[in-house]
Image (spheres, rainbow, N blue to C red):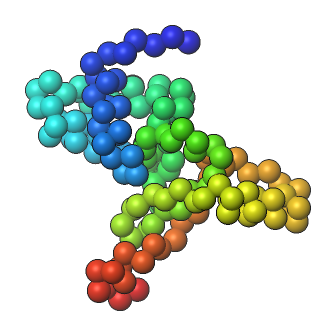
Amino acid sequence: MAHYQTKSRRQILELMDRNPDQSYTADALAEALMAQYGADAPGKSTVYRLVGKMAEEQLLHKSEQEGTRCALYRKAGAHCHEHLHLKCLDCGKLMHMEEEQSALLLNEIFKKNGFTVDEYRSVLFGRCGCRAKGGSEQ
């Protein structure tokens, strides 16, 4: 289905391009757009509508916020369907696992369980060491 490249759509993509590893709720995205574009920013209902459509088009990756039913959106990478993702529970950083490592792990899962993982929708949660870098205890 064809879509128009509206100003609101362009603003969302520009913000996501500048923050490719950042995940946003639709509310947080609307606030970030308001901070960036002021009165020129799309309204909250427009943001909700567009992020849903953009997730269906795989321009944005949609996931669920841990412990809630709240949707998170982030920029979909060109090759996000070819590797797994690692998400830090402390700082929220999303990392892309190397394709070779992902392939080895996915092959093992298939060999042992006969199960094929959808890499595009798979995120492994853990901690990246940001707390150790900041001097906090884990």
Quadrant in which the C terminus appears = bottom left
Q: Residue 84 vs residue 68: left or right?
A: right
Q: How many labels does the image show?
A: 0
Image height check: is 86 above or below 43? below
Residue 107 pos. (x, y %): 81, 59
Measuring 51% from the left and 47% from the top, which residue is drawn there?
63
Q: Which of 73 and 80 is in front in this view?
A: 80
Asked if one can make out residue 109 in the rendered structure from this viewpoint, the answer is no
Image height check: is 136 above or below 121? below
Asked if one can make out residue 42 in the rendered structure from this viewpoint, the answer is yes
Hey, which quadrant is residue 31 in on the image?
A: top left
Residue 24 pos. (x, y %): 35, 46
Q: Residue 8 vs residue 107: left or right?
A: left
Measuring 46% from the left and 28% from the top, which residue is drawn there?
54
Measuring 73% from the left and 57% from the top, which residue is drawn there?
103
Measuring 35% from the left and 31% from the top, which residue is drawn there?
13
Q: Residue 97 vs residue 8: left or right?
A: right
Q: Nearer the viewer, residue 101 or 4?
A: 101
Residue 49 pos. (x, y %): 39, 25
Q: Residue furthest bottom?
A: 137
